[in-house]
Amino acid sequence: MNKIGILLVSATLLLASCSTISGLFSGGDETETDQQAVQETRQPSQQDATRSTARDTSQRVQTASRTQLSSEKSSRQFYQLEQDLDSLKKEMRTMRRYIRNTDSDISPFLLQKELQKVLSMPEVTHEIELVNGTTVRGKIIRETVDELVVQTQIGHLTLNRNLVEDTRRAKPAKAKVVLDGPIEEETHEGKRVYRGHVKNTGLRRADFVRIVFELSNPSARTVATDSAFVDGSTHMFNTSVLSDTSIEPGESASFVCTVFTPPDTKISYYTYEIHWTEE
């Protein structure tokens, strides 16, 4: 082999050695780069996991907070509801006191008395019978050749003389209380109980209406008697006496009368009487 061949072989070997060394160094860089890339790849995954864990923790905290807030809200609503009920009861008690105070300040009986003064019924002194059969009751306050002016319960009424059939003095208005329906009798040991209704069919108010029962034995002898006032309307008299045993004209009232009987007494029948007064 000549010198030129030897040089060519040496150059070839030198180039191969340089390539190998360069590959080794470059391979080391690639390995380090790959490891760095893997590390960088792994690092975002760990960050994602950390972020996911933090997000889960935040969600759990938010869920727990919402649950606590919901519980507190429910508790506040329940407490508020009870508080509203207490306030409502308190307002109702206040309203009751107000109504009682109002009733005590403005007595309906005094109000009724004042209304009666304003709306007092006129005195009935005449009865005017008309040609059509109608009867007008009132007081004649003016009379001429052509007409009559009568004060009635509904105001002044002017009547043409041609319509009047007869004029006469009216009988005084009176109350008349009669039994209204049957009497219920209850028999008990040592007593009898009587229930029923009475009605005022008269033209005036009946006051202190009372029904009296008398029980008789087979010999027609009275063995027991008692009475009871009716449960009527309330009226205050000029003497400031307040009574709830009055019956206005056309009105009815109930009664319950208990008559105690002697022991070992046979009752054959009973009688009753109705008493009242007129103001």
Image: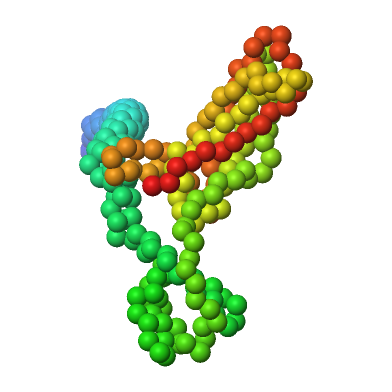
Horizontal and vertical percent for residue 139?
39, 70
Coloring scheme of the render? rainbow
* Residue 263 shown left or right of residue 55 in the figure: right
Where on the picture, by quarter, is residue 266? top right
Where on the picture, by quarter, is residue 131? bottom right
Horizontal and vertical percent for residue 26?
25, 35
Tell me which residue sits at (33%, 50%) in the image: 112
Q: How many marks?
A: 0
Horizontal and vertical percent for residue 186?
68, 25
Tell me which residue sits at (67%, 36%) in the image: 183
Tell me the quadrant of the picture where the N terminus can be found.
top left
The one nearer the camera, 243 or 106, is 243
The one nearer the camera, 98 or 197, is 197
| Residue 51 visible within the image | no
Horizontal and vertical percent for residue 136?
49, 73
Tell me which residue sits at (54%, 49%) in the image: 176
Q: Residue furthest top?
A: 264
Residue 129 against residue 65 in the figure, above or below: below
| Residue 82 visible within the image | yes
Tell me which residue sits at (25%, 38%) in the image: 104
* Residue 104 shown left or right of residue 137 in the figure: left
Residue 260 against residue 168 in the figure, above or below: above
Residue 173 against residue 266 in the figure, above or below: below
